Image: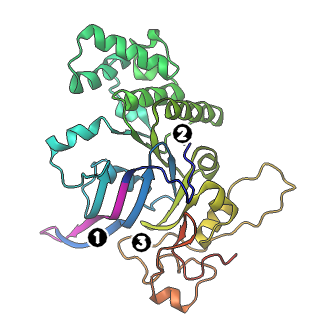
Amino acid sequence: MVTLSPKSEPKILLELKGVKKYFPIKGGILKRVQGNVKAVEDVSLQLYEGESLGVVGESGCGKSTLGRAILGLEELTAGKIRFRDEEIQDLKRKEKLKFVKEMQMIFQDPYASLNPRQRIGHALEEVFTMHTNMSAKEKRASVIDLLNEVGLKEEHFDRYPHEFSGGQRQRIGIARAIALNPSFVICDEAVSALDVSVQAQVLKLLKTLQEKYQLSYLFISHDLGVVRYFCDRVLVMYLGTTVELGTVKGLFADPLHPYTQALLSAIPRPSVHVNTKRIRLQGDLPNPANPPSGCPFHTRCPIAQDVCKVDKPAWQEYEIGHFAACHFAGTKI
């Protein structure tokens, strides 16, 4: 776990500056570009070595697109990505190969990325076939070690994907992600499809692996309860933009942005005796192809005023390590 303080700041592993990802809208007989879906709009952040940074927000806010853009699975429209002090957004395919071992992803549905006709052991061996010069015997031994590392057994080597439970398949996905000893792993809704009890087991496994191998996680999730347990810091996204960033302790105790306050108010409480006010936002997420002027949240914000409709709020640091983009940051709904 990373502890951020004004006296001692951990080393930056990943840095994003002004990252944008637009998807063109084409129409007409000639399929000309008529507009863009602004999935990620001017995102800047830093990820430190050994920390877990949670990324939260409603469906469609750009969380997963941001993760895919970092790994190069989506080509950037604009912006820079630095990994270990080297810009990687414009590297050619061969030049990016050296970063493949360092940057990996755990997907929400591991079954969709597994060949149903291929035994699990052989699927994991492919990782070593592509990136190492191991012999067949060494590859099998490495795969068995991986299976043991994630809580599976040697007997699972020859089984097919459909013979595993959802939790076991996610463990296979984790095994594949850590096979090349990465330093950075993106968890894209990695536990959202699992039962609560299985979620706890997988999260415990991820924490154990993080401590053992000094992994850094970008943890994409819509479950704020899981994020509160698992992460060190939290980035809140809305309509492709960042609206708040802070430590888990600071953000959950004193959310500055009204959107963050609304998200936190929706977390289920363990006791019926805890009196909490549920903040219900009016309307749906605006069209990312035609975002509102000024503050993107003003169309649903209960405290919005005229300035919010015209001027986009600046990204400011209100406390050490606690940032927000709101004209009336700190105002309680």
Query: Can you give x and y, in whole percent of width and height, for residue 143 in the image?
Result: 37, 17
Residue occupied by mark 1:
36
Amino acid at pointer 2: Val
Query: Can you give x and y, in whole percent of width and height, for residue 329 in the image?
Result: 60, 77
Does 130 lie within the magenta span?
Answer: no
Amino acid at pointer 3: Asn
Q: Farthest left residue?
A: 30
Residue depicted at 37% across the width and 76% down the height: 290
Determine whether, in the image, residue 279 is placed left or right of residue 153: right
The secondary element bearing badge 2 is classed as loop
Can the viewer see residue 141 in this picture?
yes
Indicate the quadrant containing the C terminus: top left, top right, bottom left or bottom right.
bottom right
Depth check: give the residue in front, 84 or 277. 84
Disc 1 from disc 2: Cα separation = 31 Å
Stretch in magenta: 15-31
Can the viewer see residue 117 in this picture?
no
> Can you say whether 85 is above or below 316 in the image?
above
Q: Quadrant of residue 105?
A: top left
Asked if the residue at tag 2 contacts the one at tag 1, i.e. Cβ–Cβ closer than 8 Å, the answer is no
Depth check: give the residue in front, 73 or 95. 95
| Mark linked to residue 180 | none
Residue occupied by mark 2:
191
| Mark linked to residue 287 | 3
Q: Earlier in the sequence, mark 3 or mark 2?
A: 2
Depth check: give the residue in front, 271 or 322. 322
Indicate the quadrant containing the N terminus: top left, top right, bottom left or bottom right.
top right
